[in-house]
Amino acid sequence: HRLSRISDAIDLQLLFEEIYPLLYLDINICLLTCEYSYQPIINVLAIDHSQGPSVHGKYFHFDMVDMEMYCDVNEERGQRFKVYVKRTKYTGDVKIWLSNGGGSRGNAHGRFDKDQMEAIGSGYFKIGDQIEIISRLYD
C-alpha cells in the first residue's frame, strides 16, 4: 500500500533508523558465530587415463567447474587437497590438474598423492564417486 502522508514516510524512516543498527548487529553476530558448512564436491565422471587400462581407477576425471573457485587456474604442476571420498569414507590427499589427462569425460583430473597411491593402487575410484574437498594443501 502507498504512503498516504509525508508524516507516514518520516515515521517509517525513523523506525528504520531504530531497527537498522539491531539488524546490522544481528548479521555481524551471525557471521561471527554461524558455521560455514559448504564444502565443494567433485563428481567423478570417468576413471580412465591416457596411460591405458592398467591405471583405470587410479585417476578420476571431473568437470573443472566443480573446482574452479578453489584452484589456481594458472597452476600447471597440479595442486594438492585433503579430501573425503564419500563411498569409501576415506580421507586422504589428492593431486588435481585442470586438464583432461586422457579421460573419456571431464576436463580436469586427479589422483591420490604418491604415498597413498602406492598403498591404494589402481581401481580405487569409481564413476559416480563424490569427493568432498576438505582443504587445500600447500607444499
Image (spheres, helix red, strand yellow):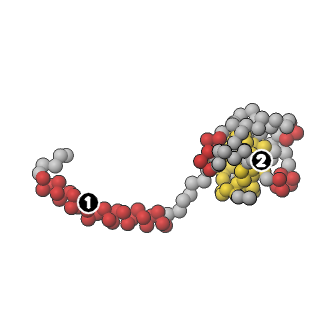
Q: Secondary structure at mark 1?
A: helix
Q: Tag 1: residue type?
A: Phe
Say which label, 1 or 2, has the lower sequence index. 1
Number of numbered markers: 2
Which quarter of the picture shows residue 58? top right
Q: Could you say which is closer to the camera, residue 7 or residue 127?
A: 7
* Residue 55 higher or lower than 10, as above or below: above
Where, quadrant-wise, is the C terminus in this rendering?
bottom right
The residue positioned 85% from the left and 49% from the top of the image is 121
Q: 124 or 82: nearer the eye?
A: 82
Task: Name the amino acid type tagged 2.
Answer: Arg
Few, some or many residues within 10 Å of mark 2 (<14, 14–19, 20+): many
Residue 12 in the image, given as x and y percentages of width and height:
20, 57
Residue 126 appears in the picture as rendered: no
Residue 81, percent across and down?
70, 54
Residue bearing the label numbered 1: 16
Say which residue label 2 marks: 111
Q: How far apart are labels 1 and 2 at the CA level?
A: 54 Å
Residue depicted at 66% across the width and 53% down the height: 133
Q: Is residue 139 above or below residue 104?
A: below
